[in-house]
Amino acid sequence: MLILQSVLLAVEWLGCFPSVPMGKGSPLFYLCSKMSPSIVGQMTDLIYAEKDLVQSLKEYIQAEESKLSKIKSWAEKMDALTMKSASDPEGYLAHPVNAYKLVKRLNTDWLELENLVLQDSTSGFITNLTVQRQFFPTEEDETGAAKALMRLQDTYRLDPETMSKGKLPGTKYRSSLTVDDCFGMGKTAYNEGDYYHTVLWMQQALKQHDEGEDATITKAEILDYLSYAVFQLGDLHRAVELTRRLISLDSAHERAGNNLRYFEKLLEKERVAKLLNKTSAITESAVQGGVYERPADYLPERDTYEALCRGEGVKMTPRRQKRLFCRYHDGNRNPHLLIAPFKEEDEWDSPYIVRYYDVLSDEEIEKIKELAKPKLARATVRDPKTGVLTVANYRVSKSSWLEEHDDPVVARVNHRMQHITGLTVKTAELLQVANYGMGGQYEPHFDFSRRPFDSTLKAEGNRLATFLNYMSDVEAGGATVFPDFGAAIWPQKGTAVFWYNLFRSGEGDYRTRHAACPVLVGCKWVSNKWFHERGNEFLRPCGSTEVD
């Protein structure tokens, strides 16, 4: 019966994945992504916390409205009474009951009203807010969130207008940025000394302000930052223009007046230099029309990396496509896989990268995420100079490590990876689980160590191979890319990709430098197992040359 089911499964699958040479089509084109960017799982906790605060606020409002209703009723009653009593005080007080009630009101009733007015309806709300505040994001988190948006903006070439209007691919909800939000983005960039993004976001804030959008921030405040940031980018003429506009709105703005005099002095020097045929190189570097070049940074393959993240520049040629196949994989006739082999598909020929299908079930994925969430912490990297683990802006995710005794599912998944690869997990690292939330990424890096002081190299050897499980689909972004040879692999829930980091000689394969693209929309969960050299000497023996 099992064999029959296996055959039927094979027939069904082969209908979609022929065992003949398979031409891989171009990857799907996605406009694909220090809040330590909090993982989406933890961010959802903030959603519920905010919902609880709103409910608490509504209860406070209801209590205040009830109190005001009582006060209003009292005031209306007393208004009618005093109108009557004040029209004929002596006649009113001639009645002994009226005299008694006046004394009672002033001695007792008004005191009760005073107590009602002084009644503190805020205590419940303030208490709840105080308790919840300890879990709120910090100013550092807000800065990180803003920088994450800028990272997405750069990687996927999204202009501030697109970001501000929330026109992102794959989004279920539409969300926009206000003038004040755009100003906050620009101010964050300014405080980081990032004048390029300061200009982009202050320009967007000014545009929306000019269109009549309500804002607490004034145009003068926007122009104050924008004019100076433009000056820092070398555009003197526009800096003067913006500063003059600022002064027209606020003639008493002292700093703007000083800046204008300074800018005009520099312009005069530039004019004289031009007459002497010594044109300022700084002014020439500024692009006309308020568009400026993005400054170069520390990553040499930045353009290639980001293009691959967008689905551009993938070097999948027709010749290469003909060398890629799909098949059933039984782990070299591993007894555990003979009845139920895994679907295997070539992703790249050299270096060889392969994808396996249906490696993890939905139930296993949810269990692994459940085990990992309480342990998640900001992912670290090893400082190349000191060897000490530290956080870095080029790796923005949260990760945790799971041991086999944490749950039977961990042991089961570990052994499954061993069966598929034919490598031993005895010297492999623990199962690492990582979550990439808002703007989460890991810029180009090697999985194998190039540091002689790594203590693990002596005991277990270097990282021989990487087995990467995709535990979620991603609406946009989040690809795994290899800038050296132009490959892009897109997350697909339940699948896994595998590649060797070392040649058979033990030398590092520098072509395997890869990156996790920023998540543009959605949430990316992965888990991975790094297999080490020790214990695999006979399972993957040395080759005859250094690059076998």
Image: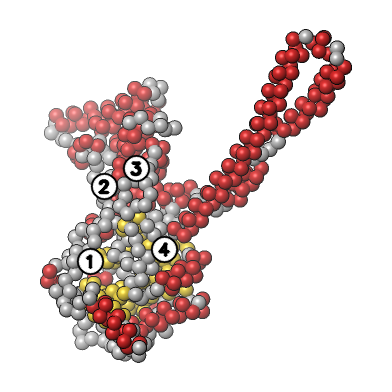
The quadrant of the picture occupied by the C terminus is: bottom left
Q: Are marks 4 and 1 in contact (CB under 8 Å)?
A: no
Name the residue tied to disc 3.
164
Secondary structure found at label 2: loop
Quarter of the view holding residue 347 = bottom left
Name the residue tied to disc 1.
487
Q: Amino acid at mark 4?
A: Asn
Residue at mark 2 to residue at mark 3: CA–CA distance: 19 Å
The percent position of residue 161, horizontal first and vertical second, equals 30, 41
Residue at mark 3 to residue at mark 1: CA–CA distance: 31 Å
**Residue drawn 37% across the image and 46% down it:** 174
Residue at mark 4 to residue at mark 2: CA–CA distance: 29 Å
Name the residue tied to disc 4.
435
Quarter of the view holding residue 356 = bottom left
**Residue drawn 34% across the image and 22% down it:** 248
Q: Amino acid at mark 1?
A: Ala
Which residue is nearer to you in this view: 195 or 42?
Answer: 42
Indicate whether 125 appears above or below 384: above
Name the residue tied to disc 2.
294
**Mark nearer the N terminus (3 vs 1):** 3
Q: How is the image coloured?
A: secondary structure
Secondary structure found at label 4: strand
For this orientation, the residue located farthest to the right is: 96
**Residue drawn 85% across the image and 17% down it:** 99
**Residue drawn 32% across the image and 28% down it:** 243
Query: Nearer the viewer's eye, disc 1 or disc 2?
Result: 1
Residue at mark 4 to residue at mark 1: CA–CA distance: 22 Å
Which residue is nearer to you in this view: 233 or 423?
Answer: 423
Secondary structure found at label 1: strand
The percent position of residue 272, horizontal first and vertical second, equals 18, 28
Q: Are marks 4 and 2 in contact (CB under 8 Å)?
A: no
Indicate whether 300 appears above or below 452: above
